[in-house]
């Protein structure tokens, strides 16, 4: 029964590089390219955090491997307040980016299988392979909102017998922009609990849920969920490299000890000025609430507008819940495209770039079958600094 679960062997990151390289070449020829390919926050870093960074520019000490106590306290309080989950400073680990935390976790966990939905963020599968783990792809469908269903997880675990499993979930999602319906999430959590599956919840887009209704997976499965987040998306500070992880009590001190071992032998600690600035970013203040809320409202209006425009031209897509991505499905045009020799998502995105000057990333880069005519659209090609100054509209005019 191929298509529902199989060994994950994607090496599609090259597609991403290819599109970026082609965009650059076309721009050099004077073409205007609409850059919906690269998924970087368009908003400036939260200004008070920038000021703290400047004040601490001369800080030069190595900091504790786990991160400073002051920052871990703020991070835990932020997530308790925003998410209503039990983050605690002593169980938080700070790293130079959540990407490194995901990799460290894959190294540290004694899992024998890492379950990765498809589509999913490009780095999970290569990281699993680098960590020497066995990655399994769980294919999803447009109809199921590109999400693993509780029945699918249950069936997979029953058919493949008991073993240590780590399931990676990412909501709001990259590349889909979607979150789980609360009811589906509760059922998924119940299945994970029943089969002893540990969940790695990558919730880096959580604070950018468009309606401010992010439902952390740890709320439904507190004892078995490791949660990662960081400053890259909601604080616009991807290049600062600061990620955070919460390890629940029930997963034991041993895991945290192993992670600290990996951290101390590799990255040592996050840069001192960045940790000071992050403590400012993670402090709940009225200014922070306005900063987050303004981003959410703009992203919501722009995301809904893009989804409507796609739907109006016959390309089905979901209205996003959070973050800044859409994952349209062009299969309504399959026949017309086939006549032109376009049968894969890579051929589709190459043609869109050449003929329309619009850069998207092909669905195959995210683990979809090459012939699934999907693509990721990152709706971030706008002046975020300018928009932060303006009141967001309820909807955008066409
Ligand atoms: N997880 C997802 C889903 C992402 O989209 C990204 C950013 O590209 C990351 C993790 C990595 O973020 P960081 O900058 O914290 O390493």
Image: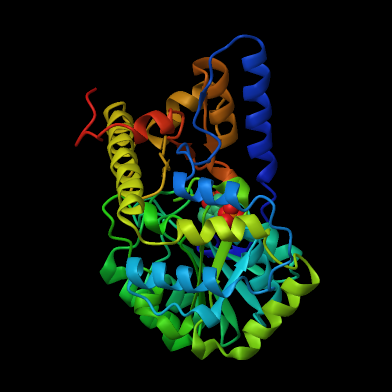
Relative to 398, 21 lies left or right? right
Q: Quadrant of ligand 1?
A: bottom right
Q: Residue furthest left?
A: 394
Question: Which image quarter: residue 161?
Answer: bottom right
Q: Residue furthest right?
A: 265
- The answer to whether one can see residue 166 in this image is yes
Nearest the viewer among 20 and 230 is: 230
Give coordinates of residue 76: x percent, y percent: 45, 73
Q: Is residue 316 above or below residue 213?
A: above
Nearest the viewer among 74 and 32 is: 74
Question: Which image quarter: residue 140?
Answer: bottom left
Q: Is residue 7 above or below residue 110?
A: above
Nearest the viewer among 197 and 347 is: 197
Give coordinates of residue 14: x percent, y percent: 70, 41
The residue drawn where x is 75% and y is 63% is 130
Give coordinates of residue 264: x percent, y percent: 76, 73
Give coordinates of residue 81: x percent, y percent: 33, 69
The residue drawn where x is 61% and y is 50% is 240
Question: Which image quarter: residue 182?
Answer: bottom left
Q: Quadrant of the C terminus?
A: top left
- The answer to whether one can see residue 321 in this image is no
Relative to 158, 275 lies left or right? right
């Amino acid at each position: 029964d191929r298509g529902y679960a199989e060994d994950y062997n994607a090496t599609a990151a090259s597609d991403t590089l290819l599109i970026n390289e082609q965009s650059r070449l076309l721009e050099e020829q004077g073409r205007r390219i609409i850059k919906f390919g690269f998924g970087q926050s368009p908003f400036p870093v939260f200004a008070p955090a920038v000021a703290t960074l400047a004040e601490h520019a001369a800080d030069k000490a190595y900091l504790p491997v786990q991160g400073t106590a002051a920052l871990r306290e703020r991070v835990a309080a932020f997530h308790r307040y925003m998410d209503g989950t039990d983050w605690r400073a002593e169980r938080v680990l700070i790293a130079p980016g959540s990407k490194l935390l995901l990799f460290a976790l894959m190294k540290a966990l004694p899992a024998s299988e890492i379950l990765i939905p498809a589509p999913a963020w490009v780095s999970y599968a290569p990281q699993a392979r680098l960590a020497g783990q066995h990655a399994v792809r769980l294919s999803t469908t447009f109809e199921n909102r590109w999400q693993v269903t509780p029945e699918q997880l249950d069936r997979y675990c029953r058919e493949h017998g008991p073993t240590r499993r780590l399931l990676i979930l990412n909501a709001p999602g990259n590349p889909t922009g979607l979150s789980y319906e609360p009811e589906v999430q509760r059922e998924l959590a119940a299945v994970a609990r029943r089969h002893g599956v540990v969940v790695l919840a990558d919730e880096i887009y959580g604070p950018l849920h468009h309606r401010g209704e992010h439902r952390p997976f740890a709320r439904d499965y507190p004892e078995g969920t490791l949660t990662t987040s960081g400053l890259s998306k909601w604080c616009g500070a991807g290049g600062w490299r600061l990620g955070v992880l919460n390890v629940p009590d029930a997963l034991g001190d041993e895991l945290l000890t192993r992670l600290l071992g990996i951290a101390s032998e590799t990255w040592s600690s996050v840069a001192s000025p960045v940790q000071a600035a992050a403590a400012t970013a993670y402090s709940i203040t009225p200014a922070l609430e306005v900063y987050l809320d303004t981003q959410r409202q703009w992203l919501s209006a722009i995301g809904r507008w893009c989804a409507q425009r796609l739907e109006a031209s016959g390309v089905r897509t979901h209205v996003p819940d959070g973050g800044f991505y859409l994952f349209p499905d062009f299969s309504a045009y399959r026949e017309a495209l086939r006549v032109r020799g376009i049968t894969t998502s890579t051929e589709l995105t190459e043609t869109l770039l050449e003929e329309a000057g619009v850069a998207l990333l092909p669905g195959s880069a995210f683990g979809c079958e090459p012939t699934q005519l999907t693509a990721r659209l990152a709706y971030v090609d706008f002046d975020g600094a300018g928009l932060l100054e303006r009141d967001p509209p309820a909807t955008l005019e066409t």
